[in-house]
Image (spheres, helix red, strand yellow):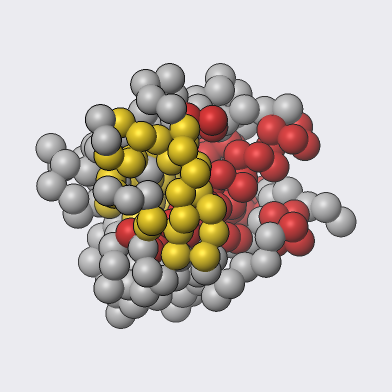
Amino acid sequence: MMRKKPALVAVAGVSAALIAVHAVQGVAAAAGRAEAPPRGSGPAKAASAAASPARTGVGHGVRVGTVTLTTREHNGTYELVDPTRGGLSTHDFFADDNARPLTDKDNVWGDGTMKNRRSAAVDAHFAAEQAWDYFKNTFGRSGVHGDGKGPAMTVHYGRNTADAYSDDNGSFFGDGKDGKNPVTALDVVAHEYTHSLNQATARLASSGEGGGLNEATRTSSA
């Protein structure tokens, strides 16, 4: 079952507080803007957090390097789902069934290159976990909706797409114009997470004065 293209807001930017705490490895592809997808259902909601126990995996991301990830073990297979953060999940848009999160046999994800489709997923999953922690620890907000449920991150979105999109269920990240530079740097993912939170609360417009506020709104430790 392929996930339908979402009704989303085109975004790009920086989350300053998270950059100050976690160094960004690599710079997100910024050349060009992709046209926002047509209206659709949006990303699938993240999986139930209570289904299976949390595990600690190792990820090798394109942007974030080697990091630890919180995953879920289910029937002997590891899923890119974080039970400790409300079932926050990460998906591959071009998977046969992209409503399901990515899976792995040994809980070691990606190899740091775009030859392995899980590498960009490591970036998105890790960065979304950091964004979740920032909003929870700083503002006491668990999840985009404040209901303890995690959003869905989707990588490899579109063909030659140098942009990212979000709605209040989660975010989509392209692989760059050449398909080799995923738009999954920590600052971009954190910015998208913040856009999702905005969609779930203030719902600022995506153009005009509201759009300016929408793009300018970011967390800052300064």
Residue placed most toward the observer, 74 or 30 = 74
Measured as percent of width and height from the top left, residue 183 is found at 44, 65
User: Does 41 sit above or below residue 69?
Assistant: above
Query: Residue at the spot x=36%, y=63% of the render?
Result: 110
Q: Would you identify the image quadrant in which residue 112 lies?
A: bottom left
Quarter of image, res 194: top right
Q: In the image, residue 62 lies at what x, y percent?
A: 44, 70
Query: Which quarter of the rendering shows the C terminus?
Result: bottom right
Q: Residue at x 36, y 74 (%)?
A: 113
Residue 204 locus on image (x, y percent): 58, 39
Instruction: Please give the name of the residue rendered at 56% of the width and 20% of the height, measured from the top-left corner.
Output: 147
View extreme (right): residue: 222
| Direction from residue 34 to residue 220 in the image, left or right | right
- Is 121 drawn above or below residue 196 in the view shown? below
Q: Residue at x 30, y 79 (%)?
A: 178
Q: Nearer the viewer, residue 191 or 110?
A: 110
Is residue 143 at least partly visible in the picture?
A: yes
Residue 84, image quadrant: top right
Q: Depth check: give the residue in front, 8 or 76.
A: 76
Q: Left of 9 or right of it: where is 198?
A: right
The number of numbered discs placed on residues in the rendered structure image is: 0
Image: 34 above or below 215:
below
In the picture, measured across the screen, residue 63 lies left or right of residue 121, that is: right
Q: Is residue 194 above or below residue 66?
A: above
**Horizontal and vertical percent position of residue 199:** 53, 35
Q: Is residue 89 visible?
A: no
Image quarter (top left, top right, bottom left or bottom right) of the N terminus: top left
